Amino acid sequence: MGDGNAKGFSVNAKTIILILLFLNVGFTIKMIKKYQNTKDAGYVREQTFKDQMEKRVQRAFGSAEELNRIVEDATRQKEEAERVAEALKDQLQKSESQKKQLLNSLKEGVYQCDPGVEGVFTWVNQACAEMFGYKSPEEMIGTKVEDIYVNIEDRRRLVERLEKDGFWGNFVSFCRKKNGVRFYTERTSNMAKDENGKPIRIEGIIRDITERKKLEEELQRNIKKLEKNLEASKKEITTLKNQRKR
């Protein structure tokens, strides 16, 4: 096929791609059009394409062997790049798995959810799932965020604050478990945004502070009781003083 210098040269798919990248195929198309109405049009078109392609390959690369060497080098580089990419992917997966194991070992709830008032949980750790009455993170992921709030206004306030400041620490709200039991929570939340500043998710740490709230409420009741007793004692003392003056 063509000149002797091209002996042993095979045109595979990768070779064709490289040829088309480096060569101007306009000439070949012109030759095909020239013979398209001849008696042996089919043969001429095919043979002309092959002959002209081989000659132009030789002019561009010196020899078919040189082109094959370029193709082989490119193939090796591509395979090496694929191996590196696969290794990086495996490493990222291992890192992600280790991170999730660490988060699942925490006693405090960790969560990620959609950035709006309405939306769903996109990721939670084991502690967060159990806090809201779910057996596993998988059971809680995908549930509506608004369903955990006794008062949906708490959710709106949180989202508005995060959209404005990007962060809110120690936010207390009254929440609801899967079975309807109500309890107090305190959370520290952050609004994650993309490179254009668009909110993409809310993430944070949440803890059950029901026992703490009970102690605080009991303390407040005792303080009020002491204040009331103190006021009553003051009145008694004042009364006794007035009686002695008589």
Image (spheres, helix red, strand yellow):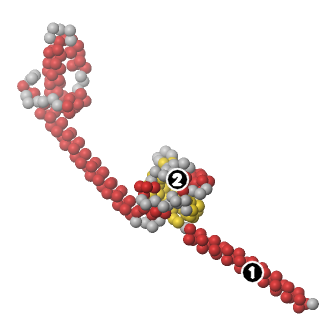
Residue nearest the observer in this picture, 6 or 217: 217
Q: CA distance from mark 2 to mark 1?
A: 45 Å
Query: Quick one: label 1, few (<14), some, or many (20+) residues within 10 Å?
Result: few
Residue occupying image coordinates x 57% and y 71%: 212
Residue on which disc 1 sits:
229
Residue 49: x %, y % from top left? 17, 20
Q: Amino acid at mark 2?
A: Val
**Split into 4 quadrants, where in the image is the C terminus?**
bottom right
Determine whether 110 is above or below 115 in the image: below
Residue nearest the observer in this picture, 125 or 12: 125
**Split into 4 quadrants, where in the image is the N terminus?**
top left
Residue occupying image coordinates x 48% and y 48%: 200
Residue occupying image coordinates x 17% and y 8%: 38
Q: Residue furthest front?
A: 179
Q: Report whether 82 appears left or right of 243.
A: left
Q: Residue furthest right?
A: 246
The secondary element bearing badge 2 is classed as helix
Lower position in the chain sequence, tag 2 or tag 1: 2
Quadrant hosting residue 31:
top left
Residue occupying image coordinates x 20% and y 40%: 75
Query: Quick one: label 2, few (<14), some, or many (20+) residues within 10 Å?
Result: many
Determine whether 200 is above or below 9 in the image: below
Q: Report whether 157 appears left or right of 24.
A: right
Residue 167: x %, y % from top left? 54, 57
Residue 199: x %, y % from top left? 51, 48
| Residue 145: numbered disc | 2
The answer to whether residue 193 is visible is no
The answer to whether residue 241 is visible is yes
Dots 2, 1 in contact, CB < 8 A: no
Q: Amino acid at mark 1?
A: Asn
Residue nearest the observer in this picture, 16 or 170: 170
